[in-house]
Amino acid sequence: MIKASSHIILSCLCIVFLASCQDHSSHSKKNEELKVVPTKTEISYFNTLLDSTFNIESKDSSVRNIQNLYFEIDEENKDGIFTFRGGNQRNSPVRGEISFQPKKIIKDWEFRTAIDSMKGAFGYWGGGAGWTGQPLVVNWKKNEIPFLSNLNPAFLSKNELKEIIQISLSGKIYFLDFESGAETRPPLFIRNPIKGTPSIDPKNKDLLFVGQGIPHRGNMAWRVFHLKKQSLIHEQILPSAFSYRKWGACDASPLLDTSSSTMIWPTESGVIYRTNYSDTSFNSVEQFRYKLPASHHQGIESSPCAYKQLGYFTDNGGNVFCADLRNMQPRWHFFNTDDSDASPVLSIEKENPFIFIGNEVDKQGSKGFGYLRKLNALTGKEVWYFERECYSSVGVKVNNGGMLCTPLLGKKQAANIIYTIFSRTTVNGAGELVALNKETGAVLFKVPFQQYSWVSPIALYDKNGYPTLFVPTVGGVIYLIDGMNGSVLYSENFGCTFESSPIAWANRIIQPARGNKIFSFILE
């Protein structure tokens, strides 16, 4: 079901932004009033606008004002895929293009991770990768390769090395050759399961930021490694005494601003960490906590997105909020019904920013609604929403339905489309991919699956800009789907549980699985 909103943007801006942005019928029709200049300038719309209905509190008495913080649009970095969904707008998990519409999936290589057989207080975790578990890729040039410590000598003479960095539920971080799956360097080991996707400093390619999902052995922490030297630089023990919630998991991928060398990393305790990562002593890590009126549940598992000076966060309580990342001042907030682990995705349309968000069925109980919503990123006002009834398995072992994937923003011929997947659309655990018109929210097509998917789908484009979707499911079936009409081009069951989000570079796709496998697929 789709509903569009109709209110006109206020013609005069107030110094205090009292609207909490929870009105589902507040669609701006005057986007020209909010036009953002595409050159490297701040969004001046927010010079005087604050949301006074909640606050972001600093642990320290003073807060640094980072005037040169500025998140560029970073969709197509040819040096690699350095964070969850490929960039700080969370909308570019693919590099390159394909030369045809594929009709078949071929398994090219398979790597097997270690398996952690210990059964701890939080269960057995094994190996492979879970949610979100996305691989990263660094495209090392010939002059950079000699500076990679512990490199297998077989790779020293290469003119170029595409190196996969793959976390694992076994607690190991693997370094693999993109083309062959061979280990390029020995793995790092943090002794605890890693669930989320790491981030790499895309400018210098020196630092690797790795979170932690479960306190399987000892403390929880986020960590920073020297990527080239494979050495631990910093370990931040979690949760902070400053936090409202005393759960220290860290599944989000941090934001890394190359203009100011600023890291922003939210955690499941509700504390947001900020620091200058060019100072590798990490002696000046700032901490911020927040409270919102609609829901006091703390915890950010999703990866925030950012544009210019603004950051966008979603949390376990259904809170969505925008902050000026230079001074951590609140700009607006919105209540998104339920736990929102899907990462927000940013879209620039006619020079104006919008975000797409989704929620799961958690606090709603065994049955409820998952929503895909489009919000004006300058005001938090809802433009439209699509709702889908979904189910959750409750009891000793909870398995939530709704929207757990991060939506996929269409490009090229699909530039007017937003794709998402709803999980557990029946009590038997089915799923459904939905394609919507990005501007209006109108349904373009739906593709039902026998089993649900938490995987964030990807689209591969041919030289004419025609999209083919690659969609794995929890039952092991991977689908190739025509991205313009929803027809299923191919499907095959690979006998694995897929929760992790894939990446692709040209015709090669890297797809982790639960258990102990990392796959490389070639499309034909």
Image (spheres, rainbow, N blue to C red):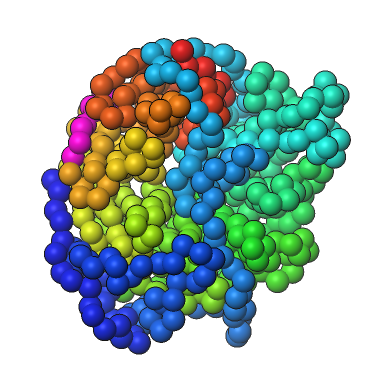
Q: Nearer the viewer, residue 222 or 95?
A: 95
Tell me where residue 127 sits by quadrant: top right
Report how many numbered discs are placed on residues in the image. Answer: 0
The residue located at (54%, 58%) in the rendering is 72
The residue located at (55%, 73%) in the rendering is 326
Chain part drawn in magenta: 443-451
Main SS of the magenta part reads: strand
- Vertical side of 412 occupied by 241: above or below: below
Horizontal placement of 514 versus 464: left or right? right
The residue located at (52%, 19%) in the rendering is 521
Horizontal placement of 287 versus 357: left or right? right
> Residue 71's x, y, as percent?
54, 61
Q: Nearer the viewer, residue 426 or 461?
A: 461
> Residue 38's x, y, as percent?
46, 62
Horizontal placement of 252 versus 394: left or right? right
- Vertical side of 49 occupied by 246: above or below: above
The verdict on residue 168 being magenta is: no
> Residue 501's x, y, as percent?
47, 35
Is residue 393 in view?
no
The residue located at (37%, 28%) in the rendering is 466
Horizontal placement of 169 versus 461: left or right? right
> Residue 417's x, y, as percent?
29, 41
- Vertical side of 70 occupied by 429: above or below: above
Is residue 479 in view?
yes
Q: Which of 49 and 62 is in front in this view?
A: 49
The verdict on residue 450 being magenta is: yes
